[in-house]
Amino acid sequence: MSNWKNFERRVASIFGGKRIPVNGRAELDIEHNVYGIECKYRKVLPDWLFGNAVKQALTGSRKKGIIPIVVIGKYNSSDIFVLTRVDDFLNATRKEDKDE
């Protein structure tokens, strides 16, 4: 079985969703009632992002007990993306659910 399929199954399990086992389509990888989850699984992730930016966010945030995020933008694009670890994301969203 492919590593990327196992990764999708793991992500589906973490989020409480269901993997959609269809190849070659322009749909999401995980069926979920709240999140539109598309998975990407790579052998190598960029050092500037995961070696530097994430490490800096983790180090600076842990001291203060806040949620570490990396905000990413692309030159000449209005799109802005947020990257965080899945545990931090789930803890933050579960905390919001409890507050309601």
Image (cartoon, rainbow, N blue to C red):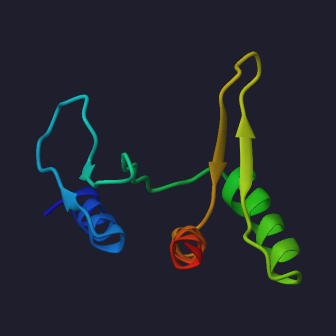
Residue toward you, 2 or 77? 77
Looking at the rendering, which quadrant does residue 78 occupy?
Answer: top right
Q: Quadrant of the C terminus?
A: bottom right
Q: How many marks?
A: 0
User: Which percent across, then down, holds residue 26?
Assistant: 25, 28
Q: Residue furthest top?
A: 76
Q: Is residue 35 left or right of residue 52?
A: left
Looking at the rendering, which quadrant does residue 62 occupy?
Answer: bottom right
Residue in the picture at 75% in, 15% down:
76
Residue in the picture at 63% in, 54% down:
83
User: Which percent across, then down, holds residue 48?
Assistant: 75, 50
Q: Is residue 52 left or right of residue 23?
A: right
Q: Is residue 23 left or right of residue 65?
A: left
Residue in the picture at 13% in, 64% down:
1
Q: Residue furthest front?
A: 100
Q: Is residue 92 left or right of residue 68?
A: left
Residue toward you, 48 or 22? 22
User: Which percent across, then down, holds residue 39?
Assistant: 37, 50
The vertical placement of 65 against 4, above or below, is: below
Residue toward you, 57 or 44? 57
User: Which percent across, then down, holds residue 42?
Assistant: 43, 52
